[in-house]
Amino acid sequence: MSAVGGWSDLTDESKKSELLAYVTNDFNMRSNSLYHSKAIRVLEARKQVVAGFKYRLKLEMAATECKKNVAHPNLESCELLNQPTQTVTFEVWEKPGGQSREITKFEVHLSSDNQTQSN
């Protein structure tokens, strides 16, 4: 168990899935790509107790063949494009009671040149 305010592993699979859907949707809204991206691997999932909860997800993201101009309710059925992946770190703050959340950190590590973009 971690100290109060320290980071610990996020082991709640339901919460992890919920956050994964939330950040994937946000990533696709921010992206200029014509194609939807999806997480292909969770590299890190952590939580921190603050005034509410802070979550950190580090994901390997990949572009899919599913275009953004067409609705795709399930990105899992979208095949991957043959493009480099990106490592993306999100920090999400969730207010006490889980009534609202916001992304407080968004960082993309481009695998081809190891540059970092932050928003």
Image (cartoon, grey):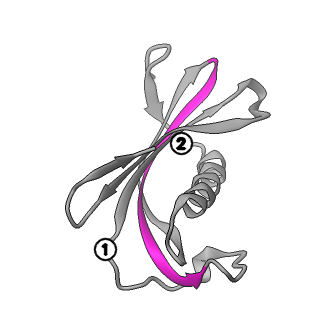
Q: Which label's residue is closer to the chain start, 2 or 1?
A: 2
Residue nearest the observer in this picture, 12 or 80: 80
Residue occupying the point 58% across, 83% down: 66
Disc 2 and disc 1 in contact, CB within 8 angstroms? no
- The residue under label 2 is 11
Give, as a three-letter code, the residue at label 1.
Answer: Pro
Note whether 75 is above or below 29 in the view shown.
below
- Where are the magenta residues, as a range? 51-67
Q: Is residue 69 magenta?
A: no
Crowding around mark 2 (Cα neighbors within 10 Å: few <14, some 14 to 19, many 20+) is few
Note whether 21 is above or below 107 in the view shown.
below
Residue occupying the point 35% across, 63% down: 86
Give, as a three-letter code, the residue at label 2.
Answer: Thr
Predominant SS of the magenta segment: strand
Q: Is residue 61 magenta?
A: yes
Residue occupying the point 62% across, 77% down: 68
